[in-house]
Image (cartoon, helix red, strand yellow):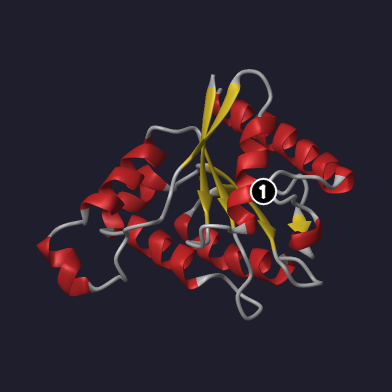
Amino acid sequence: MAKIIGLPGSLRTGSFNGMLLRAAAEMAPAGTTIEIESIEGIPVYNFDIEVEGIPPAVQRLKDRIVAADGLLLVSPEYNNSVPGPLKNAIDWLSRPPADIPKVFRNRPTGIIGASAGPSGTGLAQVAWLPVLRTLGVAPYFGGRVLVRSAKDVFDENGRLKDDTVRGQLQTYITGFSEFVEARRK
């Protein structure tokens, strides 16, 4: 059974990306689980902290990713780029550099995202590519989910209500799950 760690890129309680990740987890096909993790509690990267030891929140998340078959980043777009909190978490997960191969190298990785704005998260997803290339992940390019005007896509309970987005997300999650499963063999 394939296990994917889903990582929302926003710390906000009512995050559209958290909602999108929960919807994706519910849509995971039989034989695949998407386990939702958090970047909450990860300090701002500082080498002075690193030399004292990797913070427990970072080590826990790193261990969870290492034990998984894939990684799904659910990234908002801040100022036409990646969100600082998620980038900070990825920076910590790559420390020390000797851990990069076990955490990231050849790990099937997908990116989806939601934005309250009218243009979705396309620029953020593109901005993630050099970071992911540097880490050596196996990126999934079998589709895109770039939710725009997210306030109109989710209901008051945070559930996906837009059938078009639901179809796009289902197609993406099915394809990404197949990609992860194929990479396990």
Q: Quadrant of the N terminus?
A: top right
Is 18 on the left-hand or right-hand side of 153?
A: left
Q: Is residue 54 visible to the viewer in this orientation of the structure? A: yes
Residue at x 70% of width, y 71% of height: 123
Q: Nearer the viewer, residue 47 or 133?
A: 47
* In this view, 22 is above or below 112: above
Q: Nearer the viewer, residue 106 or 151?
A: 151
Q: Amino acid at mark 1?
A: Gly
Q: Is residue 53 left or right of residue 176?
A: left
Given the current orientation, which residue lies at the most extreme bottom position? 79
Judging depth in this view, the residue of 5 and 136 nearest the camera is 5
Would you name the residue on which mark 1 appears?
Answer: 158
**Residue at position x 21%, y 56% in the image:** 55
**Quarter of the view holding residue 182:** top right
In the image, farthest residue toward the left: 52
Q: How many marks?
A: 1
| x then y, percent, for residue 112 | 67, 53
Residue furthest out toward the front: 156
| 31 over 108 or under it: above or below | above
Q: Secondary structure at mark 1?
A: loop
- Which image quadrant for residue 149? bottom right
The residue at the point 38 percent across, 32 percent down is 67
* Quadrant placement of the C terminus: top right
- As drawn, is 3 to the left or to the right of 25? left
Q: Few, some or many C-alpha atoms within 10 Å of disc 1 (few <14, some 14-19, many ≥20)?
A: some
Please indicate, yes or no, whether residue 94 appears anywhere in the rendered image. Answer: no
Q: Is residue 51 left or right of residue 145?
A: left
Q: Position of residue 52 (x, y in %)?
A: 10, 63
Residue 87 x %, y %? 46, 66
